[in-house]
Every structure is written in C-alpha cells, then in structure tokens.
Amino acid sequence: MKLRDKLIQLKAEKKAILAANFYNFETLSGILQAASNLKLPVILQLSESSIRYMSLTVATAMAKAAIKEYAVEAWLHLDHGSSVDIVQKCLDNGFDSVMIDASEKSLDENIKITYRVVKIAEGYDANVEAELGFVAKLGQNQNEQKFTQPSDAIKFADGTGVNALAVAIGSAHGFYKQTPKLDIELLSRINKSISTPLVLHGSSGIPDATLQEAVRNGICKINLATETKNTFMLALKERLKNNNEIDLRIVFPDATQTVKELIEKKMRIINEA
C-alpha cells in the first residue's frame, strides 16, 4: 500500500501511525524490532543531518534492507526537506515519501514551493507532506508559535494538493521547558475543514493522554525523534560507566533495546487512542 493511501485509511478510521527518525543501524533496528513485535506499520524518517551523517545512498539502502529483513510494513520518508533539490535526490533514491518544509516563508510562497514538489512527486508516485504555521525547531523560541488557522489550511490544501499536512497547534521540536498544551479544539476545526491527513511534529514529551486526544481529533501521523536519540544515548552512557569494554557489538545492543522499548510504548499509546 502506498503511504498516501495508508494515511487516508487512517484518517477515515480515526487512527494514527508512528513516524520515527533513525540515526544509525542501532536506532533503525530498535524501531523495526518494535514494529515487528507488535505487528504494526511504521514510517522510518531521515532528516537532512542524518543523511549527511550516513550518506543518502547508504542510509536508503540500509533502511530498505532492514525493512525486508524484519518483514515489517514500513515506508521511508524525508523529514523536513529544506529544498526542492534534497527532495529530488531522495525521490531519485527511492523514498516513498518526502516533506518539503517552507513553513517559515509566506503562505503564498509556501503554497508555491509545495505545489512544485507535489507535481514532481507525482512522477514517482510518492507521498508529499508539508507544514503550515510555525512549529518551533531546535534552538528556536518555543513561545513564538504561529498556529495553523482553518482558513489558511483550506487555501493551502486547495492550492497544493499535498497528501499530508503538519499543523502547528502547540507542539515544538526538541525537549519542552514545560508540559506542552495542544489546542485540540483548533485541531478539530482544522480536521473538519480539510480532507488532508494531519501530522503532529514534536511528540517527544507530550503526555500520553494528549497524544491520544490528538489522534481522536484528526492526527494521522505522529513524529518522534528527540526522545529516541535521548533514550539511546542515556542507555549507552549508563552501559559505559566503569566499563572498559571496547567492542561496540557488545555495548550497543543495550541501547538498541531501550529504543525498541520506547517505540513499542509509543505505538501502544497511539493505537489505544
């Protein structure tokens, strides 16, 4: 099944799928082990920084081989593509889905750029995600939010034909300084105004009950990144305390296990919504 069809199905069923970023083989393995154990689909995400770290060719090949190895229903997605150029490269390398993020530009410019990507992706039969409003990124002020408005969402959906739309309703990327409060009423109005499946970015640190409420009110895809990195590194640091082991094949599995457990927990939370 194509990802865009899966998202349409999820929207109709008022369900959501977890989209998890991976950074190396260990985090990739942890994510897919969780999906395999729970027999649930998952979206594997690569950011531009991860692509630079692993290289596009290696990261793509590793993801596709791992999906086959773990026999999981999964899709490969570019997270926060900053340009048409990186989108094109990912599509050429066989990505199932791409995100073009022009959310910090004007509404009209965002529509123009996103429409261009949608037309390019049609030639690859690929899913396209975009962002409307402003979801603070790492290092940006989380208080300077620009929430997505239903009227803008209608204009954006009509003007781009985008397959999935990330909305700004109170979440942010990275760690939260205080417990985030999502505007569920606004989310509900956006959901009722357009047929486009909706995406929640910045789920790390959002209370479980709030995530479930978001799913019930239109969120079909939930992104998870920061919490995965943090979980992996905390476990690795603990494993290396007072330890002279130099074989990474011995020390990494403990950290991979914690990623698997985190992903399983998030998947259960989402699917219990």
Image (cartoon, rainbow, N blue to C red):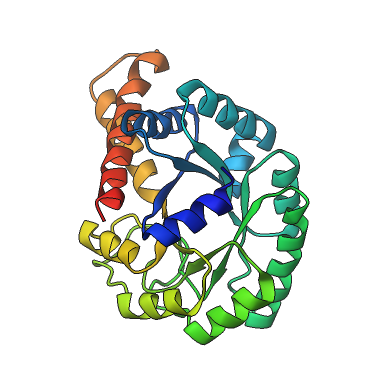
Left or right: residue 69 versus residue 260 is right
Number of marks in the rendered image:
0
Left or right: residue 119 versus residue 251 is right
Asked whether 62 or 209 is in front, the reply is 209
Quarter of the image that includes the N terminus = top right
Could you tell me if residue 168 is visible in this image? yes
Residue at 41% x, 50% y is: 17
x, y percent for residue 15: 36, 56
User: Dividing the picture into quarters, in which one does residue 203 lie?
Assistant: bottom left
Left or right: residue 113 versus residue 260 is right
Residue at 61% x, 41% y is: 51
Asked whether 112 or 268 is in front, the reply is 268
Q: Residue furthest bottom?
A: 151
Quarter of the image that includes the C terminus = bottom left
x, y percent for residue 18: 40, 48
Asked whether 51 or 196 is in front, the reply is 196
Could you tell me if residue 105 is visible in this image? no
x, y percent for residue 270: 30, 51
Q: Is residue 174 depicted above or below 75 in this figure?
A: below
Q: Is residue 178 depicted above or below 49 in this figure?
A: below
Residue at 70% x, 77% y is: 109
Left or right: residue 268 versus residue 119 is left
